[in-house]
Image (cartoon, rainbow, N blue to C red):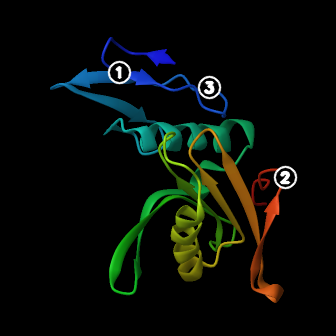
Amino acid sequence: MNMIDSEIQLPNLNLPEIQPQLKKQDGKLFIYDFHRKRDLILTPEEWVRQHWISFLLVQLNYPKGLLSLEKGMKYNQLQKRTDVLVFDQSGSPYLIIECKAPQISINQKTLEQACLYHSTLKSKFLILSNGMKHVSLRWIAEENRFEQLKSFPEAPI
């Protein structure tokens, strides 16, 4: 566990460590989002999302300009937001990452939520993650189904 002060404990995740810029203001903890260039309230889900952003950009060499965070979309008149959306070089959705807090299990409900986003955006890949467990899926359009992968998708070319 990373200790910020006696009140806040951030779990070590099953992702490469990050060096976050954290600050406390008005009793709330904030994390600086280098991609959006602003401070965000640090929630357990945001902790996971920031690790994924770093992993995509640093370890997997995804181009920064292809990432979109908390992108709004409509599904059946409801306003929804993807946690992380990556586009390919032609601007088509390539990867959706659905982040959950570390204490939330990756289950059928999580998959169904991510599939709602996929049904609208038609991405080639989908990752479900709570920072501890990750499920990486590839969409097989001809068979109208997902296939589970043993690794994460490479950066779009």
The local crowd at label 2, few if under 14, some if 14 to 19, many if 20 or more residues have their Cα within 10 Å, is: few
Q: Residue furthest top?
A: 6
Residue 17's disc number? 3
Q: Residue at x 42, y 45 (%)?
A: 36
Of callouts 2 and 1, the N-terminal one: 1
Relative to 151, say whether 31 is above or below: above
Amino acid tagged 1: Ile
Relative to 101, say whether 25 is above or below: above
Relative to 49, say whether 86 is above or below: below
Q: Is residue 40 left or right of residue 145?
A: left
Q: Nearer the viewer, residue 114 or 81?
A: 114
**Label 1 element class:** loop
**Label 3 element class:** loop
Residue 150's disc number? 2
The local crowd at label 3, few if under 14, some if 14 to 19, many if 20 or more residues have their Cα within 10 Å, is: few
Residue 44: percent from the left, percent from the top?
A: 42, 38
Q: Nearer the viewer, residue 49 or 89?
A: 49
Of callouts 3 and 1, the N-terminal one: 1
Of callouts 3 and 2, the N-terminal one: 3
Q: Residue at x 49, y 17 (%)?
A: 2
Disc 1 target residue: 8
